[in-house]
């Protein structure tokens, strides 16, 4: 296991001791969380927070968020209990896919600021003990990237082979039947050279050819360049799509059509190639030079696939996200139990998310329309107390809801325009952060790029900060506990009362200390008793640490109101 190196290796041992004596009070307060008694690394104790930069904080009131906006909120993030922020792409981009179409990997889009604003953000992050994670998009660039402009200019261009160009099968016929995730053929004809280029996503996002060593080299060097600039890691975008079958075999067609009207297809010949793992190992080697962390956008359909992303002996991604957890779309203890058991059976550290910029917000997915705040608290108490690292999505902590467009002409996300009305796109989960109850939720004085939902009047940082029973207050309490309680930091996970269909409960225990979490996932009051003798606590009594308003503990049992929660210390 690699630890966080605090000392330059060239110092002699006595010098180190002296330096440590002088610096340790500073280090302890500024950097270190409770000790890594189990050899856990910083990212295993950290809480990550995803920021969609267009929508987080707008420092210059132009209606779009920016880096200086993020920097101005470091105090808020620290106070909330966030240790690292993952910022979705903020590089120069024509913004067809809102930043996921990059035209320069080593700069900042002027809409978001400059490289010196970036450096300032890193420095302020350091002061607040908040690390910066950037989004790395290895699969494709923008069609406006200079590499692609050169590539398409002639069949002999220096960058021709940096992308995937092929002849069509015949006049007007693409090379094969592959479908773009965002609709239509995955091939676009370019009349300059009379060939098609491949794009798994939008046509404005041509796929890079990772079989070309020059592509690999420049991409690895780019990650190194950012690490040197102070980035603590990357979230790797769409890693499963890096390689395609060199023979371009047709994909098997499945019954039915998708929201875009295209035939359903098994992406057998354009995703999940073994070469992906070779590249992840190389990206990891570079990350290890800087003690950085790699998070994966790893959509998998079973735990064996997820397990593969950790790599042999842990040589690929430290943090592949378990998206199978997000597919449990109802409050179902049995389903959650089996998903947690599955991810725990993999050979790496679990990574939990409940929403992101591509998924409908958890507030809507789990909410029943009447008890949404209680359910939001329940979900917060749940995934923030599991064994693993959580990645929050901005706004989740205040119970932000989706604000889906109601008219096609208002849609900004292209898949929402082409897929309307079946697919409304992802605008709804990307609306501006709700800071207070003033116009535009205090995000911007100008009308923001996406409208805020009317619930911003009650669900905002300023209002919820004053309410001890708000979703925000619950998140803060749970995050504070998570950072200080040894059982939550280091403990194992044991599912309890596994036959209970209503209360999801588990024990986190470590060296004779334990925390019990009980979550009523039903709309009726529920009671439960726990026998913890098997877990080494034969005479356990429970002492409430964090609880919903009507939760009670006593007489050997707990009682929870509908969607109530209890986090309790186990005392012997
Ligand atoms: C990832 C991103 C998504 C983007 C796509 C193409 O799935 O999360 O937002 O559209 O990659 O880059």
Image (cartoon, rainbow, N blue to C red):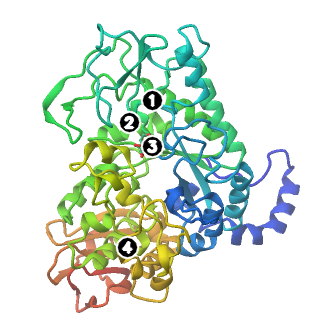
Q: Is residue 570 above or below residue 284?
A: below
- The residue that disc 2 covers is 308
- The residue that disc 1 covers is 277
Q: CB under 8 Å between callouts 2 and 3?
A: no
Say if residue 422 shows up in the picture. Answer: yes
Q: How many marks?
A: 4
Disc 1 from disc 3: Cα separation: 26 Å
First-in-chain label (1 vs 2): 1
Q: Quadrant of residue 127?
A: bottom right
Which mark, residue 97? 3
First-in-chain label (2 vs 4): 2
Q: Is mark 1 within 8 Å of ligand 1?
A: no
Residue 31 percent location from the top left of the image: 68, 65
Q: CB under 8 Å between callouts 1 and 2?
A: yes
Callout in the foreground (4, 3): 3
> What crowding class fits label 2: few (fewer than 14 Cα within 10 Å), some (14-19), or many (20 or more)?
some
Residue closest to the far front:
409
Disc 1 from disc 4: Cα separation: 37 Å
Q: Is mark 4 within 8 Å of ligand 1?
A: no
Say which of 469 and 18 sits in front.
469
Q: Is mark 3 within 8 Å of ligand 1?
A: yes
Residue 291 percent location from the top left of the image: 64, 46
Q: Secondary structure at mark 4?
A: loop
- The residue that disc 4 covers is 399
> What crowding class fits label 4: few (fewer than 14 Cα within 10 Å), some (14-19), or many (20 or more)?
many
What residue sits 58% from the left and 48% below the top?
90
First-in-chain label (4 vs 3): 3
First-in-chain label (1 vs 4): 1
First-in-chain label (1 vs 3): 3
Callout in the foreground (1, 3): 3
Q: Quadrant of residue 552?
A: bottom left
Q: Secondary structure at mark 2?
A: helix
């Amino acid at each position: 296991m690699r630890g966080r190196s605090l000392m330059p290796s060239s110092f002699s041992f006595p010098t180190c001791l002296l330096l440590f004596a002088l610096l340790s009070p500073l280090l302890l307060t500024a950097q270190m969380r409770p000790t890594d008694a189990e050899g856990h690394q910083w990212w295993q104790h950290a809480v990550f927070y995803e920021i969609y930069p267009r929508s987080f904080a707008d420092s210059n009131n132009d209606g779009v968020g920016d880096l200086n906006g993020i920097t101005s909120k470091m105090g808020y993030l620290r106070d909330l209990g966030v240790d690292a922020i993952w910022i979705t792409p903020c590089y120069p981009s024509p913004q067809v896919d809102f930043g996921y179409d990059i035209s320069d990997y080593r700069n900042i889009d002027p809409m978001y600021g400059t490289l010196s604003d970036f450096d300032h953000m890193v420095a302020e992050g350091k002061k607040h003990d908040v690390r910066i994670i950037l989004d790395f998009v290895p699969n494709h660039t923008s069609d406006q990237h200079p590499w692609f402009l050169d590539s398409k200019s002639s069949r002999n261009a220096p960058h021709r082979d940096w992308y995937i160009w092929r002849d069509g099968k015949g006049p007007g016929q693409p090379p094969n039947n592959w479908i773009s995730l965002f609709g239509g053929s995955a091939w676009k004809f370019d009349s300059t050279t009379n060939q098609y280029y491949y794009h798994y996503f939008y046509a404005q996002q041509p796929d890079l050819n990772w079989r070309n060593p020059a592509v690999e080299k420049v991409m690895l060097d780019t990650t190194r360049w950012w690490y040197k600039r102070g980035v603590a890691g990357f979230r790797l975008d769409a890693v499963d799509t890096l390689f395609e079958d060199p023979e371009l075999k047709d994909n098997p067609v499945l019954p039915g059509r998708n929201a875009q009207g295209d035939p359903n297809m098994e992406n057998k010949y354009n995703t999940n190639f073994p070469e992906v793992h070779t590249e992840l190992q190389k990206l990891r080697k570079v990350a290890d030079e800087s003690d950085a962390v790699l998070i994966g956008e790893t959509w998998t359909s079973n735990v064996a696939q997820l397990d593969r992303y950790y790599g042999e002996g842990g040589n690929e991604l430290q943090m592949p996200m378990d998206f199978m957890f997000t597919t449990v779309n109802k409050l179902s203890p049995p389903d959650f139990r089996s998903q947690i058991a599955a991810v725990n059976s993999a050979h790496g550290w679990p990574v939990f998310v409940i929403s992101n910029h591509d998924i409908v917000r958890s507030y809507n997915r789990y909410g029943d329309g009447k008890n949404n705040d209680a359910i939001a608290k329940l979900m917060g108490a749940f995934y923030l107390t599991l064994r693993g690292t959580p990645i929050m999505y901005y706004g989740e902590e205040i119970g932000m809801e989706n604000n889906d467009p109601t008219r096609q002409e208002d849609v900004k996300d292209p898949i929402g325009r082409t897929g309307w009305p079946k697919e409304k796109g992802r605008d709804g989960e990307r609306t501006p952060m709700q800071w207070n109850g003033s116009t535009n939720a205090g995000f911007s004085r100008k009308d923001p790029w996406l409208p805020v939902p009317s619930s911003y009047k009650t669900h905002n940082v300023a209002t919820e900060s004053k309410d001890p029973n708000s979703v925000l207050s619950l998140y803060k309490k749970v995050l504070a506990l998570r950072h200080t309680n040894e059982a939550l930091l280091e403990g194992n996970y044991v599912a309890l009362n596994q036959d209970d269909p209503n209360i999801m409960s588990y024990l986190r225990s470590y060296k004779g200390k334990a925390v019990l979490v009980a979550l009523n996932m039903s709309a009726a009051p529920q009671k439960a008793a726990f026998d913890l003798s098997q877990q080494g606590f034969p005479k356990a009594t429970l002492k409430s640490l964090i609880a919903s308003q009507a939760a009670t503990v006593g007489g050997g049992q707990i009682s929870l109101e509908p969607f109530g929660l209890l986090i309790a210390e186990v005392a012997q």
